[in-house]
Amino acid sequence: QVQLVESGGGLVQAGESLRLSCAASGSIFSVNTMGWSRQAPGKLREVVANIDTRGSTNYANSVKGRFTISRSSANNTLYLQMNSLKPEDTAVYYCGAFRSSWAWGQGTQVTVSS
């Protein structure tokens, strides 16, 4: 199994930045793709970004150009740099790792005030 612990969420004003981190442990040797998703109250979970072992990335249209996903193999950490935050980015953000299926962390709250 893979254990994932997110950190870095908080309350910011529109236009500001945050960086989320996700510490991965356990059977991470077999993890290929890692990613971030988010869920706002009353809405479906949305995949925000993902990255594979080659460094190829994909982003949701809603965050393209503002968010950057990266991963460090040295310390088994996944990052999400979020710039130019908007109130509609307010959500619980989850870190995920894919082997045969997705495993998700407990999430970290991001709140963007207008």
Image (cartoon, rainbow, N blue to C red):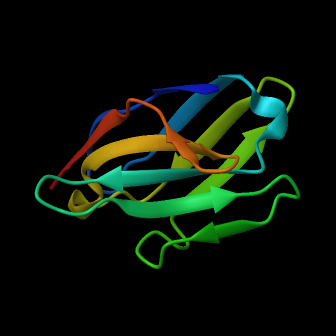
65 is higher (above) or lower (below) than 107: below
18 is higher (above) or lower (below) than 55: above
Q: So how many labels did they put on this image? A: 0
* Residue, far bottom: 61
Q: Quadrant of the C terminus?
A: bottom left
Location of residue 52 in the rendering, given as x and y in whole percent from the top left corner: 77, 57
Report the side of 94 relative to 103 (left or right): left
Identify the residue at horizontal 45%, vertical 62% (top origin). 47
Would you identify the image quadrant in which residue 79 lies? top right
Report the side of 98 relative to 19 (left or right): right
Would you identify the image quadrant in which residue 87 lies? bottom left
Location of residue 37 in the rendering, given as x and y in whole percent from the top left corner: 44, 53
Report the side of 89 relative to 94 (left or right): left
Location of residue 43 in the rendering, given as x and y in whole percent from the top left corner: 18, 62
Identify the residue at horizontal 25%, vertical 63% (top origin). 44
Location of residue 69 in the rendering, given as x and y in whole percent from the top left corner: 64, 53
Question: Which residue is nearer to you in this view: 65 or 13?
Answer: 65
Q: Quadrant of the N terminus?
A: top right
Identify the residue at horizontal 71%, vertical 48% (top origin). 70
28 is higher (above) or lower (below) than 52: above
Would you identify the image quadrant in which residue 14 lies? bottom left
Identify the residue at horizontal 23%, vertical 63% (top origin). 88
* Residue, far left: 42
Question: Which residue is nearer to you in this view: 10 or 35?
Answer: 35
96 is higher (above) or lower (below) than 40: above
